[in-house]
């Protein structure tokens, strides 16, 4: 799901069931407003979509292709990587040939490689057919240069390959010409040999090579299951730690995707999603809503944000003074800032505080949190800092159990509603003590709320 990025849901779908299990929800014209918000943000960005073979065989595949066409129509650049596990198993059964590794992480013997090449051709062809139906130009590529994995712990992995190099120039040329590259889980050695490559790994490598902003794994999983629970969003540091210390907590079916998600995030991809490719509207909901249909794993985009310290009090006071004068912010004395310094988060550039925000909780309404004192130095406006601070506050509030975030604003309510997807509500939502200070301030701010 898109936790830090958010927007109204376009008809959420149950993530666990396949397309046949429920009726397609109706997308309302008003949902477009939510989606349009993302258009300037995602425009021109590269999304790597990794389709497991089982998804290409699923009856929802046709809908998924329409979703891909929607992304393209919004000028999002799409690169498709596909797997073949499902088709490989099917071929093995049909032909009575046993396979040495399904997912390309173990040994690939000659017979398995032969079946993998056939399965790959079949899957790529189905994708070609489907994209053609949606009037999208595409091309199967040989952009993955591969080398044999070689001998691991004394055992020759035979035709299993690792990614040596991705031909960025070739892929970029296709993307620039509005051609969707299709990348098979077969790499080519310099001498022309074919190698079986795991598609989860491939998607991460392609994401890195192309500077993709997202890698989206579409598999037959409702998301990343940790300790029996599907996580909706988690920072890469947490996942890295779990993989290192307690990997058994991760559902075995999701392990490869989890490992490669970390790999992608460590090499510059900002977000990795695990989405159920069988769920109607799953992909679109994951990208354009905060309704949690899959799992979002995100890199630390917030390293410039930290909790304020006592030594920051004077700086925060000076930073916000101009906005207080313009009545954009509520006046807070240095003593008040000091008293509530734990509520302040600051944004630093080169160790200078250039923005701040507060996050407060109410003892009598634990599901509510409130952001305030949002201020970005004018020189730094329109660089996404205000958004990052609010997104960060959303994550912290959610971590602490809040389900809704409030903001009281006199002049920047447009920022909260248009950019951050808050909605206007009434002051009666405020806890009693807060309602009192609200009334006493005489500022009459608009009360805005956002579901976390
Ligand atoms: C509001 C504020 C925090 C935004 O910070 P920022 O770092 O410039 O914001 P971002 O870069 O994340 O977002 C910029 C987007 O917000 C929009 N935006 C900023 N202020 C807006 C407003 N008042 N109404 C509507 N949209 C607004 C910009 O037009 C821009 O939109 P775009 O991405 O479509 O181009 C900043 O303008 C500020 O500090 N204002 C003065 C203090 C204030 O009013 N704080 C709110 C107190 S509750």
Image (cartoon, rainbow, N blue to C red):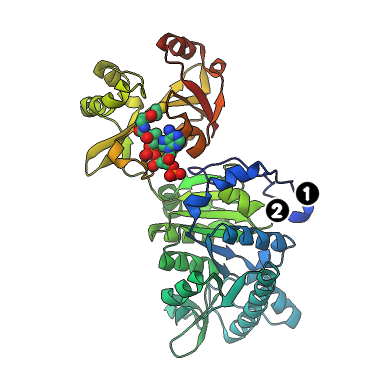
Disc 2: CA contacts within 10 A as few (<14), some (14-19) or many (>=20):
many
Residue 83 placement: quadrant: bottom right
Residue depicted at 47% across the width and 29% down the height? 413
Q: Reply above or below: 10 against 443.
A: below
**Residue 180 in view, yes or no:** yes
Residue 249 position, x and y percent, is: 52, 50
- In the drawing, does residue 121 fall left or right of residue 333? right
Q: Are marks 1 and 2 in contact (CB under 8 Å)?
A: yes
Name the mark on residue 280.
2
Asked if residue 384 lies left or right of residue 422, the reply is left
Of 436 and 152, the residue lying toward us: 436
Residue furthest bottom as drawn: 191
Image quadrant occupied by the C terminus? top right
The residue beneath circle 1 is: 22
Q: Could you say where residue 385 lies in the image, as x and y percent from the top left?
A: 36, 41
Q: Residue at x 36, y 19 (%)?
A: 330
Label 1 secondary element: loop
- Residue, x 46% and y 74% (percent of image)? 173
Vertical relation: 440 (above or below) 448: above
Percent of width and height locating residue 299: 41, 51
Query: In front here: 163 or 318?
Result: 318
Instruction: Give the SS element for disc 2.
Output: loop
Q: Quadrant of ligand 1?
A: top left
Q: Earlier in the sequence, mark 1 or mark 2?
A: 1
Q: Quadrant of residue 396?
A: top left
**Residue 358 appears in view:** no
From the Cβ of disc 2, is ligand 1 less than 8 Å away?
no
| Along the viewing direction, whichever of 294 and 432 lies nearer the viewer | 432
How far is mark 1 from mark 2, CA to CA? 9 Å
* Image location (x, y in percent) of residue 70: 62, 58
Q: Is residue 231 left or right of residue 126?
A: left
User: Is 395 rendered above or below residue 187?
Assistant: above
């Amino acid at each position: 799901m898109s936790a830090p990025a958010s927007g109204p849901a376009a008809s959420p779908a149950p993530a666990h069931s396949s397309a046949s299990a429920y009726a397609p929800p109706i997308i309302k014209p008003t949902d477009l407003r939510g989606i349009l918000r993302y258009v300037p943000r995602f425009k021109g960005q590269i999304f790597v979509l990794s389709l497991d073979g089982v998804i290409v065989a699923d009856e929802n595949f046709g809908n998924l292709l329409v979703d891909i066409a929607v992304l393209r129509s919004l000028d999002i650049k799409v690169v498709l990587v596909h797997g073949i596990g499902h088709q490989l198993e099917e071929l093995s059964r049909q032909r009575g040939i046993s396979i040495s590794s399904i997912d390309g992480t173990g040994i690939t013997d000659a017979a398995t490689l032969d079946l993998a090449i056939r399965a790959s051709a079949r899957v790529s062809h189905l994708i070609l057919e489907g994209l053609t139906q949606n009037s999208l130009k595409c091309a199967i590529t040989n952009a993955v240069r591969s080398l044999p994995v070689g001998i691991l712990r004394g055992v020759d992995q035979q035709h299993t390959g690792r990614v040596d190099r991705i031909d960025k120039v070739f892929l970029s040329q296709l993307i620039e010409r509005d051609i969707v590259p299709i990348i098979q889980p077969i790499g080519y050695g310099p001498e022309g040999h074919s190698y079986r490559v795991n598609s989860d790994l491939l998607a991460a490598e392609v994401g890195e090579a192309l500077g993709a902003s997202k890698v989206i794994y579409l598999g037959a999983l409702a998301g990343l299951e940790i300790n029996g629970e599907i996580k909706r969003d988690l920072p890469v540091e947490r996942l890295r730690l779990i993989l290192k210390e307690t990997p058994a907590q991760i559902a075995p079916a999701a392990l490869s995707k989890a490992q490669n998600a970390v790999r992608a995030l460590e090499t510059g991809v900002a977000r990795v999603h695990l989405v159920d490719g069988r769920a109607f509207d799953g992909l679109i909901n994951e990208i354009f809503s905060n309704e949690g249909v899959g799992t979002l794993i995100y890199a630390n985009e917030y390293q410039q944000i930290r909790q304020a310290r006592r030594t920051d009090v004077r700086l925060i006071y000076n930073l916000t003074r101009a906005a207080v004068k313009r009545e954009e912010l509520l006046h807070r004395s240095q003593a008040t800032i000091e008293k509530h310094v734990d509520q302040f988060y600051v944004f630093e550039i080169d160790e200078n505080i250039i923005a701040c925000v507060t996050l407060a909780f109410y003892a009598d309404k634990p599901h509510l949190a409130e952001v305030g004192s949002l201020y970005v130095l004018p020189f730094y406006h329109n660089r996404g800092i205000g958004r990052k601070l609010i997104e960060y506050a959303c994550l912290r509030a959610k971590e602490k159990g809040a389900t809704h975030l409030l903001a009281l604003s006199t002049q920047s309510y447009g920022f909260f509603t248009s950019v951050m997807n808050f909605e206007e509500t009434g002051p009666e939502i405020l806890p009693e003590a807060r309602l009192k200070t609200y009334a006493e301030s005489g500022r009459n701010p608009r009360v805005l709320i956002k579901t976390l």
